[in-house]
Image (cartoon, rainbow, N blue to C red):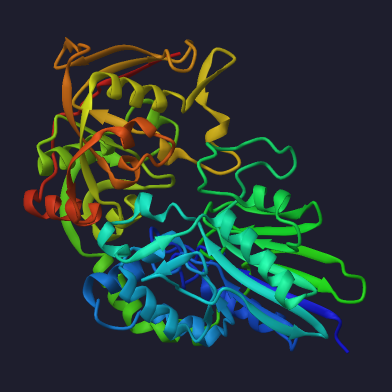
Amino acid sequence: MNKIIRILSTSDLHGMVYPYSYADMTSRNHGLARLRTMIRELRDENTVVLDNGDTLEGSPLTFYHYLNNPDEQNKIAECMRKTGYDYVNVGNHDFNYGYGKLREFIESTGAVCLTSNVLYKGKPMGRPYDIKEIAGKKIAFFGITTHLVPNWEKPENITDMEFIDAFESARETVRTIREKEDPDYIVCLYHGGLERDPVTGILGEKDCGENQGYRMIKEIEGLNVLICGHQHRIYCGTLDKVAFTEPGYTGAYLSCIEINTETGEITPQLLPADHEPAADIMRITDAEEQETQKWLDTALGHTEMDLKVHSEFDCRFNKSQLATFINRVQIDLTGADISGTRIFFTAPGFAGDITMRDLISTYMFPNTLVVKKADSRTIREYLEKCAEFWSIEDGKVIINPLFDFPNVQYHNYDMLDGVEYVMDIRKPVGQRIVSLTRNGKEVKEDDVFTLVINNYRASGGGNFDMIAAAETLREILTSSVDVIAEYIMKHKNIEFEPVNNITILP
């Protein structure tokens, strides 16, 4: 008799089915089609397959679907049904299209929803927990998601919903399971990550409750397995006898946790998505994928300017005019005095004909825009926080290693237009903005501005608490991708005088 219990899990697929990059169509070791092959090969009578959320949003395929076919069933659900998931959790981005679409998606996967700390009209979205008898052992599964979803999501998408503290919910659920079920093992599917390094215990981010996995491992007695997500990190190990994994994002890895029922040993692994993609999965979405590809290659406009990203370092150190362009679009739409934007990691930028492929590859998330009322102190604090992105090594400016590890956080460096400023990286953190002017005149203490930024930053995302605290004047609920596309189509030829308003002193 097979004595190994195998728990396979995916997380943060972000709508990625196909094994290639949408930016340049080169082959990539990611996507549900590759994972489907791996799951099929590994599955036996003692296998359970789980998904940990953030599935509905994030790829051009899902973006195209909700833009052009919003009333049709999302075919990602059919792909998951074909793959044979037993349980699904939900992630913060799964709420991007509203509760109705999320509920429809969950029901179409054929899997049991285990999200227990999200309430809809006072009742949990999923089962509080579920019990499976496998290889003579009693295993309890439960799911929770980061409770900070309301900090990022549009209010109309989470109407009548309540998000309970993930840690408190996990602790209470484990206590209940132990008392009522007396299981051999408890597995938690958590759309959240580790706030501390699992080896050193050092806090890797502001401890705001977004990620509570480390605390769960340390403080919740009776937990055996913690399957994480949300942070897009790649980690795998055992801490205080609790096995934990997080498989990155877009299906680059498959989490595989094996329990030896004879020895009690729990072995966590991350398996790279390097198998041949499953044709049966790709057939499900083939028609819509072909439409998506045509749409992606539709030219919106043209530019003779170089708005390409040639270097992750240089596009930030010397302020790529891509940032200037996005800020121009945001100011044009809102009339704000100042605009702040970021360049996403691996964004290609624009040159020549600008297509939807270029745009979606460059602006990768469904952000919306928010206009804030910001005094000069808030602007200075905002810029000081941005200045933490830089560090000094051997007399040269480098990207602060904390923005590279344990996960890349280049999206937490913003570049502003509407002011001119100088950063002196030789000075201590919090004292690096040595000059701040607007139209050549010094910004005074009593100056007040309107500031437009994306909704993630407006909510304080990236630990920009000073922005969250500023008064909200207006919200534009159209996605930033749509806003930029409309601007390009309206103007056709994108041309402007380059703005070099940021100076960084080594």
Choose between 500 and 176: the one closer to the eye: 176
Q: Quadrant of residue 15?
A: bottom left
Task: Tell whether 284 sits left or right of 291.
Answer: right
The residue shown at (73%, 77%) is 181
The residue shown at (69%, 68%) is 187
Q: Where's the N terminus, which quadrant?
A: bottom right
Q: Where's the C terminus, which quadrant?
A: top left
The residue shown at (7%, 52%) is 490
Locate residue 136, reporting x and y percent. Answer: 83, 85
Q: Is residue 499 above or below residue 479?
A: above
| Tally of numbered tags | 0
The residue shown at (27%, 58%) is 155
Does the rendering let one see residue 295?
Answer: yes
Does the rendering let one see residue 254?
Answer: no
Q: Which residue is outermost to the front? A: 179
Q: Quadrant of residue 149?
A: bottom left
Choose between 93 and 390: the one closer to the eye: 93
Locate residue 16, reporting x and y percent. Answer: 45, 68
Q: Is residue 232 above or below residue 292?
A: above
Q: Which residue is outermost to the left? A: 490
Locate residue 318, reporting x and y percent. Answer: 35, 26
Task: Tell whether 506 sits left or right of 269.
Answer: left
Task: Tell whether 466 sits left or right of 236.
Answer: left
Q: Quadrant of residue 177?
A: bottom right
Choose between 292 and 189: the one closer to the eye: 189
Locate residue 404, reporting x and y percent. Answer: 55, 37
